[in-house]
Amino acid sequence: MHRLLPGRREFLRQFGVLALAGGWPALRGEGGAAPLPNPVGYATISWPEGQFKEALQTISGLGFKGVQTLGWVREAYGDSRVETLRDRLHALKLQPVTLSCSNVVLDPEKPRDETGELRAYAAFFQRLGGLYLQVTDGGDPRKRYLADAIRQLGARMTDMGKIAQDQGLTLGYHPHFGTIGETREGLGRVLDATDPHYVKLIADVGHLTLGGADPAEVVRAYHDRLILTHFKDVRPDVAALARKNRDLVEAAEYHFCEVGTGVVNFPAVLEAFRETRFKGWVIVELDSFEAGPGGVAASARANKDAIQKLGFQT
């Protein structure tokens, strides 16, 4: 398990002061304040593919209300098997919130028709009772793409958003370290090239922090497009590498850690939630991390405790 940083108690104290000053519900247990309104789920990416059923059981057992899954689930539970998974999620009281469309690349330099792939994801997730489809861009943050390439990328993403809406779903763009959306500038270029009616935002406080952006500022700037926020923390050693040279980060084996044990400014993020009245889903998505002796389940329990201390209800 990751050792709790010395500043964690101070982190929680500062959040309590911020909450009381801003009118946002205080930490759970402080004055009996009501929990934050956002439903909270967990992503199965933390577990190996072969432990998918165990992951769902653990997520449900910890009281999370929803789940995000990877794209391989479409192949594993396609056709008639989708009902089996839907019934299992219903029994576990888990809302299928988001599906990562892993096979949709959206490379600005190698445009290809990926609408068929997106349609397959949409049809599957609609049958499962899901809400959002997640896509990233396939660009390189170290390259400066011409405006026309970004416009074409945005148009392709908009077309995918229309397909998602035809199935009763919503498409969310997920800025990710290692893509154009790694930086604040890149994130803005991609979103500006899309139609806001069809392409929304799935923000990740860990990836935004690692790429040098301010997650709270992104929440405020795009609150009208924000549909979901990923919570994870950034390892202090990796954050230090990113400040020196972002290329050093790619050589690090692990990038992230449990909520409250890294450098993400969660009090500022929740203040932005309060100001913008964001009540959408929060998904704890812990990938590229080092599990301790207790394994992935222990990390999930630690994240649950941290989420509750922030004021969320699970």
Image (spheres, rainbow, N blue to C red):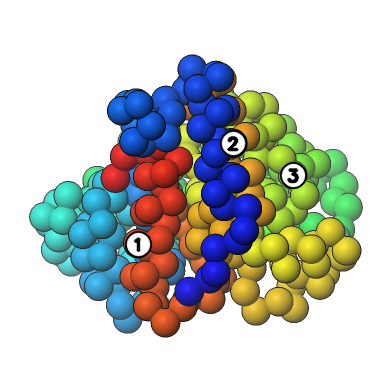
From the top left corner, tell me how far across and down residue 27 is, in percent: 42, 35
Can residue 220 be seen? yes
Q: Nearer the viewer, residue 159 or 224?
A: 224
Identity of the residue drawn at 26% across and 65% down: 58
Identity of the residue drawn at 59% across and 36% down: 14
Q: In the image, is residue 144 above or below residue 3? A: above
Q: Residues within 10 Å of mark 1 (few under 14, many from 20)?
A: some
Label located before the other in sequence (3 or 2): 2
Label located before the other in sequence (1 or 3): 3
The secondary structure type at the circle numbered 1 is helix
Q: Which residue is mark 1?
A: 301
Q: Which residue is mark 2?
A: 14
Quadrant of res 203: top right
Q: Are marks 1 and 2 in contact (CB under 8 Å)?
A: no
Q: Nearer the viewer, residue 298 or 102?
A: 298
Left or right: where does residue 253 sit relative to residue 277? right
Looking at the rendered structure, the kind of residue marked 3 is Ala
Looking at the rendered structure, the kind of residue marked 2 is Gln
Left or right: where does residue 71 sit relative to residue 95? right
Quarter of the rendering occupied by the C terminus = top left
